[in-house]
Amino acid sequence: MFNDQIGKQSNKVKNAVERGAVKKFAEAIGDLHPIYFDEETGRLSRYRNNIAPPTFPRVFDYGVIEGLNLPNKGLIHGEQTFHYQRPLLVGEEIYCYSKVKNYFEKKGSFGQMGFLVLESFGEDKAGNIIFSSTSTIVISEAVRKVLVK
């Protein structure tokens, strides 16, 4: 179904690690460690700045992969992993993009399921990778039937 999408990449999109957004995100996930929002704690840390929580890149815009048309409803977030070269610093700009890494199907108790594996990246202005993530989107048989029509 999505085998022809493997290897396709989105355009790079500039995202800001904005102080207010980091604080709201930390509050939303229930992690109120002062390294995320207290300026003095950030200044005194080894990073000399506040940092974002490890899952903060979920809020970034990763651009559009042309031809990858997924529905807005019915998808299942399978799993996601993050790998960091260093933490995200509050105030910096990150350039994000995604690639289709793989697509495969398996038969299960709910019918034929599709598994779309995406790799996402965040780079600094110089093009150095700060983080990468791999996520799996599960596409149920019901959603697959709608996509095939």
Image (cartoon, rainbow, N blue to C red):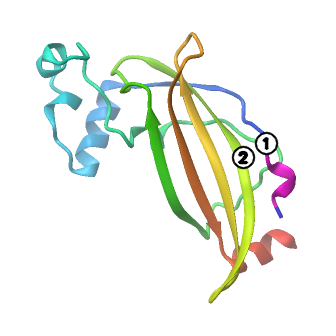
Q: Earlier in the sequence, mark 1 or mark 2?
A: 1
**Whole-percent x and y of residue 143?**
71, 74
The residues tagged by marks 1 and 2 sit, at their Cα atoms, a distance apart of: 5 Å
The residue depicted at 27 percent of the width and 50 percent of the height is 29
Q: Which residue is mark 2?
A: 100
Q: Which residues are magenta?
A: 2-7
At mark 2, the secondary structure is strand
Say few, some or many: other residues with alpha carbon within 10 Å of mark 2 (under 14 / 14 to 19 / 20 or more).
Answer: many
- Picture residue at 55% right of the left edge, 12% below the top: 125
**Residue situated furthest top in the rendering:** 126
Residue 31 vs 40, above or below: the answer is below
Image quarter for residue 8? top right
Q: How many marks?
A: 2
User: Is 41 above or below relative to 138?
Assistant: above
Label number found at residue 7: 1
Q: What residue lies at 23% left-to-right and 45% top-to-bottom? A: 27
- From the viewer's side, name the closer residue of 120 and 74: 120
Check the picture and name the quadrant holding the N terminus: bottom right
As for residue 93 lying within the magenta part, the answer is: no
Mark 1 and 2 residues: CB-CB less than 8 Å, in contact? yes
Please state, as top left, top right, bottom left or bottom right, where the C terminus lies in the image.
bottom right
Q: Mark 1: give few (<14), some (14-19) or many (20+) Cα within 10 Å.
A: few
Where residue 18 sits: x, y (%)? Answer: 37, 25
Point out residue 119 in the picture as x, y percentages from the top left corner. 62, 43
Q: Is residue 20 left or right of residue 93?
A: left
- The amino acid type found where label 1 is placed reads Gly
**Residue under the point 61% across and 36% down:** 62
